[in-house]
Image (cartoon, rainbow, N blue to C red):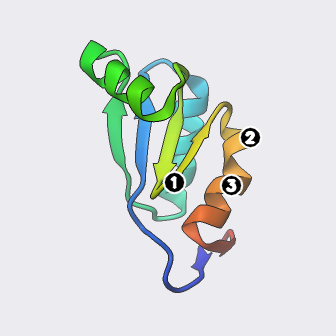
Amino acid sequence: MKTAPGYPSRLLVYTTPTCPDCLALKNWLSRQHIAFEERDLTDPEIAAEAKSRTGVRVAPISIVGEDVFYGTFQSQKPGLMKALGILAED
C-alpha cells in the first residue's frame, strides 16, 4: 500500500457476521495493512449508534473522520482509498 502523508488512520467499520461485503471490506483492509475498529451491527445498541451517526441501516458502514461510506464494498472502495490516502494498491 502506498499512502499520502497526513491522512487520518482511524477507521471505524460497522459490520454483520454474515455480510459478504463486510468480509470483502475487512479482507481488503487487512491486505492493505490498515487498522480498523469493528463494531457488530447485530448488537441492538451498536445498530442504534450506527443509525444515529450515519442515518442508514445497512452493512457495511465505514467512517473515516467525518466521511461516511456505505453500500457494497466495491462502491465504498474508491472513496475509502481517497479518504485513507491510498495512492496505489500493492
| Residue in the picture at 34% in, 19% down | 48
Residue density around tag 3, few if under 14, some if 14–19, many if 20 or more, within 10 Å: some
Q: Secondary structure at mark 1?
A: helix
- Give the residue pinned by disc 2: 75
Q: Residues within 10 Å of mark 1 (few under 14, many from 20)?
A: some
Between the residue at mark 2 and the residue at mark 1, the CA separation in whole angstroms equals 15 Å
**Which residue is depicted at the point 38% across and 61% down?**
10
State the CA–CA distance, disc 3 to disc 2.
8 Å
- Residue 79 disc label: 3
According to the picture, the residue beneath numbered tag 1 turns out to be 29
**Mark nearer the N terminus (2 vs 1):** 1
Viewer-nearest of discs 3 and 1: 3
On screen, residue 6 above or below 37: below
When the figure is inspected, residue 25 is found, relative to residue 5, above or below; the finding is above
Pick whichever, 2 or 11, lies toward us: 11
Q: Position of residue 58 (x, y in %)?
A: 55, 21
Residue at the image position 68 percent from the left and 50 percent from the top: 77
Q: Determine whether, in the image, residue 88 is placed left or right of residue 22.
A: right
Question: Which mark, residue 17?
Answer: none
Local secondary structure at mark 3: helix
2 vs 1, front mark: 2
Three-letter residue code for mark 2: Ser
Q: Quadrant of residue 24?
A: top right
Q: Where 45 sits versus 50, above or below?
A: above
Q: Is residue 17 above or below residue 72?
A: above
Q: Amino acid at mark 1?
A: Leu
Question: Which SS class for mark 2?
Answer: helix
Residue 15, quarter of picture: top left
In this image, 50 relative to 45: left or right?
A: right
